[in-house]
Image (cartoon, rainbow, N blue to C red):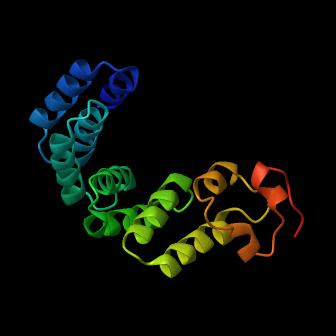
Amino acid sequence: MRLSRVYANRGDFALATANAQRAVAIDGKNAEAYTCLGYAYLKARNLAQAKEAFQNSVRLSASDWFSQFWLGQLLLEQQDAQEAYPHLLRASKLNPRMPNVYILLYSDLLMLGRRKDALAELDDFLVGEILGWFRLGRIGRLLCHIDPFQHHGISRQGSVGLPVRL
């Protein structure tokens, strides 16, 4: 099954999809097989099929953060912030150290008009993960319309990945 992800990352969507479809055919109750199939479809931009595969994966295993994340991202791309929210929130709880989840959760909450909640989620990530080293250069650039550092009383120099003493 993981071979399917390798093929998808290489751009060989036909092999990725065929490999994942074989895994699903062998065991239709295997959440990881559906995750691989969804990922292959997503990389090939077959969004309807990707959504269905990720929904099957989430239905079979609610503890798979990867499927929760990708389903949330897919729904967010389709401007369905309301449906994306529970998947992104679940992914953030299952894998609290993944910055990409928080970026999408933050974006989702902004789309829903919940700016305070968006900032609170960003706060949770900042406090929980990045007190010593600020690996926020990428996140800071994406969230340039707010100043997450000012909220914490921290100098902007921390946003370039330099160690900051608190």
**Near-viewer residue (55 or 85):** 85
How many marks the image carries: the answer is 0
Q: Specify whether 96 is left or right of 13.
A: right
| Percent coordinates x, y for residue 106 in the rendering | 49, 66
| Percent coordinates x, y for residue 34 in the rendering | 21, 43
Question: Is 27 rendered above or below residue 139?
Answer: above
At a point 75% along the width and 56% down the height, the residue shown is 134
At a point 58% along the width and 69% down the height, the residue shown is 122
Give the residue at the far front of this rendering.
145
The picture quadrant where one finds residue 157 is bottom right
The picture quadrant where one finds residue 125 is bottom right
Question: Is 166 rendered above or below residue 8?
Answer: below
Q: Say which quadrant the N terminus sits in.
A: top left
Give the residue at the far bottom of this rendering.
116
At a point 51% along the width and 61% down the height, the residue shown is 102
The picture quadrant where one finds residue 45 is top left
Q: Is residue 82 visible?
A: yes
Q: Specify whether 120 is left or right of 129.
A: left
**Near-viewer residue (147 or 25):** 147
Q: Specify whether 36 is left or right of 147.
A: left
| Percent coordinates x, y for residue 16 in the rendering | 26, 24
| Percent coordinates x, y for residue 82 in the rendering | 28, 70
At a point 39% along the width and 20% down the height, the residue shown is 10
Q: Say which quadrant the C terminus sits in.
A: bottom right
Q: Is residue 30 visible?
A: no
Q: Specify whether 71 is left or right of 154.
A: left
